[in-house]
Every structure is written in C-alpha cells, then in structure tokens.
Amino acid sequence: MDIKTLFTIFIFFVVQNLHAEDGHGLWLRGQSTNSVKIICPKSSATLDIAGQELKQSWHGKSGATIILTVKSDPLIKGEGFKLSSGEIQANTDLGILYGAYELLRLQQTGEVIQEEISNPSYERRLLNHWDNLDGSIERGYAGLSIFWRNEKDLLTVTENDKILWQEYARANASIGINGAVLDNVNASPLVLTTKCLGRVKAIAEVLRPYGMKTYLSVKFSSPSLIGGLKTSDPLDPEVIQWWNDKVKEIYTMIPDFGGFLVKANSEGQPGPQNFGRTHADGANMMADALNPFGGIVMWRAFVYETSGGDRAKQAYSEFIPLDGQFRDNVIIQIKNGPVDFQPREPFSPLFGAMTKTSAMPELQITQEYLGQSNQLVFLSTMWEEFLKSDTYQERPGNTIARCTDGSVFPQKYTAIAGVANIGRDTNWCGHHFAQANWYAFGRLAWNNRMASEKIADEWIRLTFSPRQTDQIKNSNIRKWQKHFLAPVKQMMIQSREAAVNYMMPLGLHHIFAGEHHYGPGPWYAPKGLRPDWTPPYYHKADTNGIGFDRTRAGSNAVSQYHEPLCSQFNEPNTCPEIYLLWFHHLPWNYKMKNGRTLWDEMCYRYDNGLQQVRLFQKIWDQVQPFIDAQRFTEVQSKLRRHCRDAQKWKDGCLQYFQQFSRRPISFEIERPVYDLDDLEKMDFQQ
Ligand code: GCW
C-alpha cells in the first residue's frame, strides 16, 4: 500500500473519531474547512505530507496561498525552517514539514505569525521505547507495545499496525521528534536476527516520510548468543567482524538506520567489563562498525554496583577516567539525575564534566517514579529545572542545556532522549494528561530553552480547544480561557512540586515500596535484597535524624560538582532546601530557614502535597462545562485515585518516620487516615 492510500485511510479514521473524544487524536485535532493553495515546486513523500497537513488544518485566511521552498540558507540550521508571510523555507524537506506544523500550531493557538527562523537545539531528538519483543513494556503503563507482539505472530505486519505507526510518526513529527529506539535497553539478542530486522524495516518504512529514523537497543553479548561465537570480547577479531557484518546487513535493509543504544555492565546486563575491557573499548568497537554508514552509538552511563559505595557517585567515577577515549560517533547517554529518575534529584555531575566526550541527556517520560498513569504530573517543569541548572563547568552560566547542545563543547552529534510513555491504550499514554509529557519532551528537544508555561499553554489549547468541543459552541473563547485554560494550566504547572511534596520532599529519594516504584515504602527492606534496592539505604532515618550524608565528611559525592556547587551543597545552610536530605543527614530538630524544625517541615510538606492534589480535584470538577464528557470523567476518576495515593504517601511516610523522630505529627495538619500496619501490607498498585 502506498503512502497516499495509507494517509487517506488514516484521515478517514481521524474524521470518524472526531467526536469520540477518547483522546486518540492527541494534540492534533485542528481539522478545518478553510482552504489554502499550496505552491511547491518539488515533490517527495515528506513534502506531500506537509501539503496535506496544511490543507487539512488550515486556520489562516481561507483562499490564502503558501509557498514551500527548499533552499539552503546559512541561518537555517539542519532541519530548521523559516516562516514568513505566505512562505515556509527550509534546507530540507523535513524542515518544511516541521515549518508546516509550526505554522498550524501558531494558527490554532491564536498566536501572531511573525517572520521567524526556528532551529532545533539538538540534532537527534529521540524516543526510547522500553518495549520487549513479546509486546510487554518495561515500566509501561499504557498497554502493550505498538511495535512488537507475542512470539506467534511477532513478524506479521497488519494494516492496523501500519495505521498506528503512521499516527505515531505523525504525532512525533508534529513536535519535532526525529527518531525512535524501538526496543528495551534490557535488550533481547533476537532483535538482531534477520527475521526481527524484517519487522524493523517495515516500521522504518512507515516512519521515514515523517523524518523519523529507527534505532535499536542491542545486547552486548549478541555475538555469542545469536552469532555462535565463543566470546563477545570487543577486541576479538571475530567479534569485530560479526558486528561489522551485522551492521552491513542492517543498512542493506534500512539505509537510514540511526544506530545503537547500549546498556552495558548495568543491572546484570553484559558488557565489555565481562572481558576485562572498558566502556570505551566496547562502545568504540560498535562505533567503528557503524561509522561508514553514518550511524551512532548511544552508550548509557547508568551503571552502579552493589558493592560500589554511594550509588549516586558511580557513573561519574566510571566515566570520567575514560574522557577522551571515545570515538566521535559515540554519545554518552546520561540520566538527568545521578540515581534514577526520582521525583527530584540534583543533576548528574557528569554533565559538562566530560570535556572531550559527547554527552546527551536521558529523560523519562513514562512516569515510573511519578505515579505511573494514575497521577497527573506534568514533567516539563522538572525537565526545565534540569536543563537550566548551571553546571559551572568551564565558566558560570554553562547550563546543562548549553553543555549538551553543542554551545560549550564541539560535539559531532548532539542528541536528547526521552523514555516513551506510549502504548496501545486508545489515548496512547494511559492518562489524558500524560500526553502533555510526550508533547513537552518534543518541544524541549526542539528548543531546550522553552518555558513550561508556554508548553502547557500550547498543549491545552491544542488538546482541549473549544473549537473541538461541541459543548462550548456558543460560549466565547475568553470565558474558556478564564475558566478552563488558566486553572488547568495552573494545575499542570504545580503538579510536579505537589508530587515531590507528598512523595519525597526536601531531597528524600527512592523510598518506594518494592520493585513497582509506585506506592510509599520507606520501611521496605526484605532480607537478602541488595541494600541499594531498599529505601533505608537512601533515607537513613534513625533517632538522630534523617538523610544521606554526601558531604566531604560523608560519601563526598559533593566533590563531583564544580565549585561553587561543591561547597554550597556541602553546607546545610547553603544547600538548597529542595536537596537538603539528598546531601545531608540532619537531626529532627534541625532549624529550617522558615523557623520550623526539620520534622515539622516534613509534616507540612507531606500534607501540603496532599492538599495540592485535593485542589486539583476542585479545579477539574469546575471545568466540566468546558470539556467533553468522556475525557472529563476519565480524568476525574484518575484524580480521585491520585488523591487516595497522595494520602497513602503522606500517612505512610509520616507515621513511619515518626517512629524515629518521636515527635507528634504537627497539629497544624490533618491527621492520618490510614494505619501504618495496613499500609505496610498494602498492594498499592491495586
Ligand atoms: O530505573 C530503572 C528501571 C529499570 C530500567 C533501568 C534502566 C530498563 O527500574 O526498569 O531498565 O532503570 O534505565 O536501565
């Protein structure tokens, strides 16, 4: 089936579902009857899509003309574009498509269209899917994989598959995402078998016209597991040959294949260290195989050993000595924080510290540690906080954004990745508001200086715009802005801080019950489990106080930060209170800046988080007249669950820590409603 027929079928579905409001249409619901004339001297699959999109969703003056010009301009970088009255100009066809989406977005959000050049912050803007070949998704909360199915029909590609992949590619292109890693970083070696690559090729063909490249996570021991070799030692000539041949085979099938993502010597995954080699030896071997085809290796820095001391220090300790040893088509992919996607962490000290090695941020869009698909948490503010963090490397003002987008260090490739929150659920992400996190990731990957307020504003207008909701037909837009847009935006912007408050305020981290990473479990410490997989390792509460001592007198993790951060973090009175218990073990009566004791402040924060969620419920109930019934009810129900969860977090953590603080739960706040005994036995995911 050619791309045009596919597009027609797909538009048919979109139109059919226009009134269903089940969330499947994401932020792309701007169909319009206004007409526009497109002048485009060239034709290609990508340009044709740009033209169709403009025709289908034109909200400018009816009968207007728009010219699409592919022409190099030194001010336009890579896949960037220039918008001017009646024209979209770009260096590439894909740039035109991005320009078309931007123009439509401006029209639909009611912004003034001025002449503008828009260039992407990162060259590669990628989703990482932790999808297994059996169709399950590690840390996925929105149903099964859209790419893989169980063994029996793993390789059958249906028309429905193609429609879904096309919708997926379109949504990504509309926010500038240009690549996807299709399988879990805990990779199966089977993904590299010729049969599986056939499916990857089928996916790549659907994604290609939308400018999305495919990438694969690969298992380091693939040569021995599927290649029949005795070893997977990266310096062994047969192993090198095996990877060279495999890469050649991939590019024969998928000429624009992007490259590999590798999790090595981490959480039980094999890697070069199994053969006495370094991360650089392993990464370079793959990089050399990919280099002739323009492919890259994204080598993850998420490494820690059970006996390796403070987990927060380990990635830095392992990678800094290797700085300068990696090929220029290797990028070290670093999680935003030094531990693991917690509700709040200081940034990983690796950013900006490797001056001779390319680095890229890895963010987590799926809400593994932030309420999964039950809680409304807009992650953009967290990512903004991270990207804006000053590393002080080289000189003050060198933020993470600057240290990773090529502004500070010359990087051959720049990139950013987000672990996807997408599954087969009708609304893609499980929670209607989780779509905003997918959207925000794309927008920040395109422009890493964008403000979360702006992103939320755009997303709300595009997703819930009154034009699309019958209920509001007769109501005016100003009323909608005041009673829907403003309060919903406020709720989104506050939601991450609320989550930090009811889960782990003041720098607390990783205090989840069990492996599911959902409910509270500061008490969780089954016998025999490695200590760094249990909360007491992180909170260290005792009758003397609470918190992880990472000062010079403690684990000395502070030393991994550039001055003045190192000294600031080292002293409790200069350490930002949001990171206090990340870096310090402090007595329960420690005096906070506002005069409260640490214990009272904890009580206040936990309760405050819960009260914020109650407020979100009130906000949402009041917007009912402005929204379709289905999305209203589904979000309302999720918020009720969210509120019950926040209550459990507050009650569980405060009563547990109270055993050590031996102080009353501040009488200013509401009393707990759950018993600690019950909470300790509870299955929070029920
Ligand atoms: O946070 C942990 C997750 C694992 C994940 C790992 C990683 C894919 O709990 O499920 O494995 O991080 O990022 O590799």
Image (spheres, grey):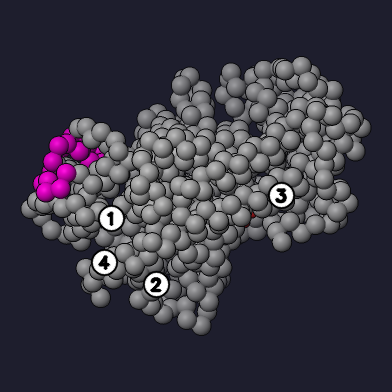
Q: Which residue is mark 1?
A: 31
Q: Amino acid at mark 1?
A: Gln
Q: Is mark 2 within 8 Å of ligand 1?
A: no
Q: Kindly identify the residue that appears in the image at 38 percent across and 36 percent down.
A: 478
Q: Amino acid at mark 2?
A: Asp
**Which labelled disc corresponds to residue 482?**
none
Q: Is residue 275 visible?
A: no
Q: Residue furthest bottom?
A: 152
For numbered disc 2, what is the local secondary structure? Answer: helix
Per the image, the residue denoted by label 4 is 7
Q: Quadrant of the N terminus?
A: bottom left
The image quadrant of residue 194 is bottom left
Which residue does the numbered mark 2 point to in the structure image? 161
- The Cα–Cα distance between marks 3 and 2, rounded to whole angstroms, is 37 Å
The quadrant in which the C terminus is found is bottom right
Mark 4 vs ligand 1: CB below 8 Å: no
Q: Amino acid at mark 4?
A: Phe
Q: Nearer the viewer, mark 3 or mark 2?
A: 3
Whichever of labels 2 and 1 marks the residue nearer the N terminus, that label is 1
Taking the image in four quarters, ligand 1 sits in the one at: bottom right
Q: Is residue 592 left or right of residue 346?
A: right
Q: CA distance from mark 2 to mark 4?
A: 14 Å
Residue type beneath disc 3: Arg
| CB atoms of marks 3 and 2 within 8 Å | no
Q: CA distance from mark 3 to mark 1?
A: 38 Å
Residue sitting at 34 percent across and 67 percent down?
A: 16
**Image position of 276 with respect to 568: above or below:** below
